[in-house]
Amino acid sequence: MLLRKASILALLTLASASAHAAVEPILTTGYEFGGDELVQTTTTDLNAGGGISFGAGLSFTPDHSTMSLRVVLHYLFNSVEFNSPDGDAEADSFPLELGLFKTWDRHEFGVGPSIHINPTYQISSSSPLLNGEVDFDNATGVFLAYHYIFSRAETASYTTDTYIAVKLRAMDYETGNTQIDADSLGLYIGAKF
């Protein structure tokens, strides 16, 4: 309930701020170290909420403010192959993040709700007993982020900030009576321009 109220408040703030705000595109990519183990192999694991992430979104910064509202949609995916029996497994989702960020010089701190849309886990193998798909319910959690702006390029019409980031996310995936931990620690590189 609290996350829904925060999301509604953030959307109302976004709507009112966009008329007098700088609107900047965001591109980001990174890797999330996820929660519960879905598949373990001899070389790597497949964890809930983990994998490679690509994201794009918008940053809304009111005039003369160090606060910004950011909306970013990611595609998060991971896959592994295994032997005995031969097969593969994959997980993916579409995380939507709505964050409130505060900037101090080259440091940015953010917090907000994270909604994973359509989290899915699929496994296929040469064994008829080891095949299937799980479609988890859409999941809502919260994230905390820190960005360090290591490059800032300014022109008369725009500024490009390139940053590295660390993100913590608290979240659970659910389907029916089953709940799994999808918490994650993410390392990212991104640009706002």
Image (spheres, rainbow, N blue to C red):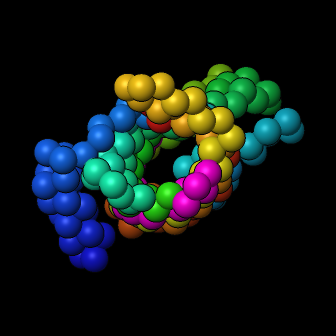
Q: Quadrant of residue 100?
A: bottom left
Q: Residue at x 24, y 61 (%)?
A: 10
Position of residue 167 measured from the top left corner of the image (x, y, whole percent): 59, 55
Q: Quadrant of the C terminus?
A: top left
Give the percent coordinates (x, y) of residue 45.
74, 43
Q: Residue at x 63, y 31 (%)?
A: 79
Q: Nearer the viewer, residue 30 or 184?
A: 30
Query: In the image, is 13 to the left or to the right of 117?
Result: left
**Residue stretch in magenta:** 104-120
Whether residue 104 appears in this view of the structure is yes
Relative horizontal placement of residue 13, taking residue 130 as reference (left or right): left
Q: Residue furthest front?
A: 156
The residue that appears at 15% across and 59% down in the rendered structure is 12
104, above or below 77, in the image: below
The structure residue drawn at horizontal position 86% and vertical position 38%, both measured from the top left corner, is: 42
Q: Residue furthest bottom?
A: 2
Residue 178: image location, x then y, percent: 44, 64
- Residue nearer the viewer, 14 or 136: 14
Q: Which residue occupies the foreground of this view, 119 or 94? A: 94
Magenta: main secondary structure equals strand
Q: Is residue 42 highlighted in magenta? A: no
Q: Is residue 135 visible?
A: no
Q: Is residue 119 magenta?
A: yes
Please give the count of numbered marks on the rendered protein.
0
Pick the residue in front: 112 or 77: 112
Position of the N terminus, as image quadrant, is bottom left
Q: Position of residue 111 (x, y in %)?
A: 45, 64
Q: What is the quadrant of residue 181 in the picture?
A: bottom right
